């Protein structure tokens, strides 16, 4: 599984001024700013635009469908997906294990919340 395939988007203020500010700052069009924030472009310039947007209060957003999630007393979060994938997050260690049809498929260490969102998104798209 590749975490880089599901990047989400960077959400900025809706008043219209933030996109114009970023376009002027980097000497690009609003379309280029949109492509950078939507991860449609991955050039060095697009990465700089995303970094500036985050520094100015933008939020990294990953949208996911809702799946059954269980938080148990032993400190685990378990998510089961309709495609036979189960995600098990060990809250104390930050380790996330992904099982495909009951077999361990992937293990991730020291997972951040952003990375967890990407892993969840990947789990939802795996063909079982």
Image (cartoon, helix red, strand yellow):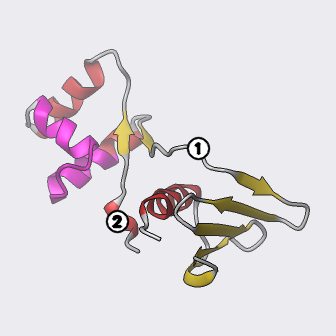
Prevailing secondary structure of the magenta residues: helix
Where is residue 4 shown, x and y percent of the image? 34, 65
Give the residue number, with chain letter if any, for mark 2.
4
Q: Is residue 89 placed above or below 15 in the rendered structure? A: below
- Secondary element under disc 2, as helix, strand or loop, is helix
Sequence-wise first label, 1 or 2: 2
Q: Is residue 40 placed above or below 115 in the rendered structure? A: above
In the depicted view, which residue is nearer to us: 118 or 127? Answer: 127
Instruction: Please tell me which residue is depicted at 48% across the width and 58% down the height of the picture.
Output: 124
Where is residue 71 shown, x and y percent of the image? 80, 56
Left or right of 39, for residue 128: right
Where is residue 49 shown, x and y percent of the image? 24, 45
Left or right of 79, for residue 23: left
Q: Residues within 10 Å of mark 1 (few under 14, many from 20)?
A: few
Contact (CB < 8 A) between labels 1 and 2?
Answer: no
Query: Per the image, is 44 magenta?
Result: yes
Instruction: Please tell me which residue is depicted at 62% across the width and 68% down the height of the picture.
Output: 86
Number of on-image labels = 2
Magenta region: 30-51
Q: Quadrant of the N terminus?
A: bottom left
Between label 1 and label 2, give the one nearer the viewer.
Answer: 1
Q: Residues within 10 Å of mark 2 (few under 14, many from 20)?
A: few
In the depicted view, which residue is nearer to us: 12 or 103? Answer: 103
In the depicted view, which residue is nearer to us: 19 or 52? Answer: 19
Query: Per the image, is 62 magenta?
Result: no
Instruction: Please tell me which residue is depicted at 89% across the width and 68% down the height of the picture.
Output: 74
Instruction: Please tell me which residue is depicted at 24% across the width and 51% down the height of the picture.
Output: 48
Q: CA distance from mark 1 to mark 2?
A: 21 Å
Furthest-right residue in view?
Answer: 73
Give the residue number, with chain letter if any, for mark 1.
66
- Secondary element under disc 1, as helix, strand or loop, is loop
Where is residue 80 shown, x and y percent of the image? 64, 60
């Amino acid at each position: 599984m590749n975490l880089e395939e599901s990047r989400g988007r960077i959400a900025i203020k809706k008043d219209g001024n933030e996109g114009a500010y970023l376009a002027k700052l980097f000497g690009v069009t609003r379309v280029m700013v949109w492509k950078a924030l939507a991860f449609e472009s991955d050039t060095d310039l697009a990465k700089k635009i995303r970094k500036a947007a985050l520094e100015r209060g933008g939020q990294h957003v990953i949208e996911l469908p809702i799946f059954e999630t269980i938080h148990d007393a032993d400190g685990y979060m378990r998510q089961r997906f309709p495609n036979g994938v189960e995600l098990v997050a060990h809250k104390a260690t930050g380790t996330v294990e992904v099982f495909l049809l009951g077999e361990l498929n992937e293990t991730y260490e020291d997972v951040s919340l952003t990375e967890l969102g990407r892993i969840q998104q990947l789990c939802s798209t795996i063909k079982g």
